[in-house]
Amino acid sequence: MKSLKAIIEKGSDGFYSIYIPDIPGLYGTGETESEAKESLNESIEAAIEHVKETGCDTYYASLIKVHSIEYVYDLSGFFKTYNFFDVTAFAKRVGVNASLMRRYKAGIKKASATQKTKILEGIHAVADELHAVQF
């Protein structure tokens, strides 16, 4: 079963875009994340239809064997989507320089794999704590 990774971004204009790094030119956009995913699915369907109709053996031909899409956020897109996070406080909690975290959020700087792992583990820890909350 073949899976593709699609990156979710949220622009400063509030619109979402999703692209597949392995397949140039294939993307979706929308006012919501859901609309962008739907737009991407329509793009994939159109590309597959084109391959079937024309028999062209381009990089789009690999889409025929795709069974799933793994959606992931870039850090900027995550913090723009879940904008209720106090990024400075969160940075302190996970042990990342607050100024650097704000640059990740703004999309000015890209996090290393180590930093991404540290941030993701912090997000999951917060989610586990919130899940345990009772009233």
Image (cartoon, grey):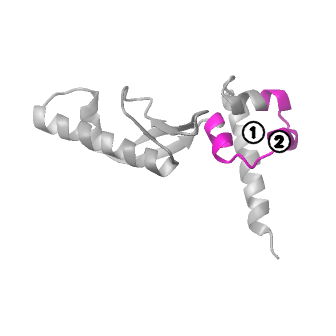
Residue 56, disc: none
Residue 41 covered by magenta stretch:
no
Q: Position of residue 4 (x, y in %)?
A: 41, 40
Instruction: Report the amino acid beneath label 1.
Output: Lys
Label 2: state its secondary structure: helix
Residue 125 position within the rendered picture, expressed as x and y whole percent measured from the top left: 77, 53
| 9 with respect to 82 (left or right) | left
For residue 2, say whether it is visible.
no
Query: Residue 48 falls in which quadrant of the image?
Result: top left
Residue at the bottom extreme?
Answer: 135
Most distant residue in the front direction? 13
What residue is rendered at 74% in x and 49% in y?
84
Residue 70 appears at what percent x and percent y? 47, 45
Residue stretch rendered in magenta on the structure: 76-101
Magenta stretch containing residue 98, yes or no? yes
Q: Is residue 82 left or right of residue 3?
A: right
Rendering coords of residue 53 (x, y %): 11, 37
Residue farthest to the top? 108
> Which of marks 1 and 2 precedes in the sequence?
2
- Residue 40 in view in this figure: yes
Taking the image as shown, residue 78 lies to the left or right of residue 55, namely: right
At x 37%, y 29%, the residue is: 23
Q: Please give the name of the residue rendered at 45% of the width and 29% of the height, measured from the top-left corner.
A: 21
Left or right, 67 with reference to 82: left
**Number of the label disc, if any, that sits on residue 94:** 2
Label 2: how many residues lie within 10 Å, few (<14), some (14-19) or many (20+)?
A: some
Mark 2 residue type: Val
Choose between 21 and 114: the one closer to the eye: 21
Compared with 43, 84 (above or below) is below
Task: Assess whether mark 1 and mark 2 are in contact (beta carbons under 8 angstroms).
Answer: yes
* Residue matched to label 1: 118
